[in-house]
Image (cartoon, rainbow, N blue to C red):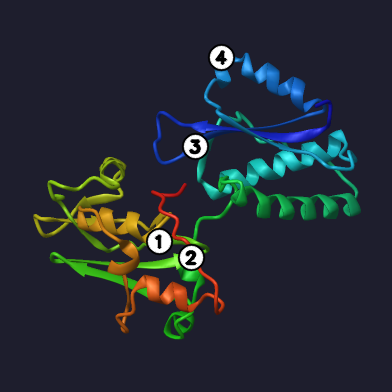
Amino acid sequence: MARTGVYLLVGPDPEDPFKERVYIGETEGVFKRLLQHARDSNKDFWTKAVIIVSKDENLTKSHVRYLESRLISLARGAGRANLTNDTQPEPASLPESDKADMEFFIDQVQMILPVLGFSLTQPRPAVSAQTESEADAGAFPFFVLEQVGVKARAREVNGEFVLLAGSTARKHGVASWTSYKSLRHQLVEAGKLVDGAQPDQLVVVEDISFGSPSAAGAVVLGRNVNGRLDWKVEGSGETYEEWSERRLPAGSSIAPIEDGVTI
């Protein structure tokens, strides 16, 4: 593919189980550059590649240098992935009209990347961005999970289920626990769950984003759970499942996505 574009090399980071390792680059010959990286032992981490080009082939070297710089900046700001780029190049100098076109281009990329499963340039969910009045109105309610002596609060933000700091979790899981057990261990190792005031409890010290309410529920309760039933809307007792189905248009349905922690 002898086309000018930007590319992202993505793979697991063996030193950080909560994040992927990413390299962002630009080139005037995407296919040739990827072949070079495939032979580079310093970049043997990547298992997936994203290639960003224009269908009209109207991106110039200056355009892709601008895009590369902006994407690196977005990825660093999001903090969801560990970048292997040594430096962040300054955006190429472009006429204002071209700069506006590139910002629109980036907006389109920002919409497409999450659909493809790449959230590395997306800002982390900000629970504080949703007002208490919205929560009171039921648009973005708080969810609670109160069982076995622990109490956890969570909120759905931009499609992610966010377990809130200050929540408590059971310290020792049950013998039959299988789902998300290793994830809970990783969270403890990372210092996101620490010993609480009660000897049988852990405390969540920072907001943690999960891909599903079941993942969050399993981490809190130390056992296999159906989070769509166990999490309840604070104040009403409505289950997460009832709340989510009520928000769907009449006659439609949605299958739950059961992931682990998101990056």
* SS for callout 1: strand
Q: In the rendering, which numbered label is found on residue 41? A: 4
Task: Identify the residue position indicated by label 3 in the image.
Answer: 20
Whole-percent x, y for residue 146 in the image: 21, 70
- Identify the mark nearer the N-term, 2 or 1: 2
Q: Residue at image x 40%, y 57%?
A: 212
Amino acid on which disc 2 is placed = Val
Tag 2: Cα neighbours inside 10 Å, few (<14), some, or many (≥20)?
some
Q: Which numbered circle lies on residue 162?
A: 1
- Looking at the picture, tell me which residue is in the foreground, 187 or 89: 187
CB of mark 4 within 8 Å of CB of mark 3? no
Report, in whole angstroms, how far the alpha carbon at label 4 lies from the one at label 3.
Answer: 18 Å
Q: Is residue 158 above or below residue 10?
A: below
The residues tagged by marks 2 and 1 sit, at their Cα atoms, a distance apart of: 7 Å
- Looking at the image, tell me whether mark 3 or mark 2 is earlier in sequence order: 3
Query: How much space separates mark 1 and mark 4, taking CA atoms?
Result: 37 Å
Which residue is the extreme one toward the front? 251
N-term-proximal mark, 2 vs 4: 4
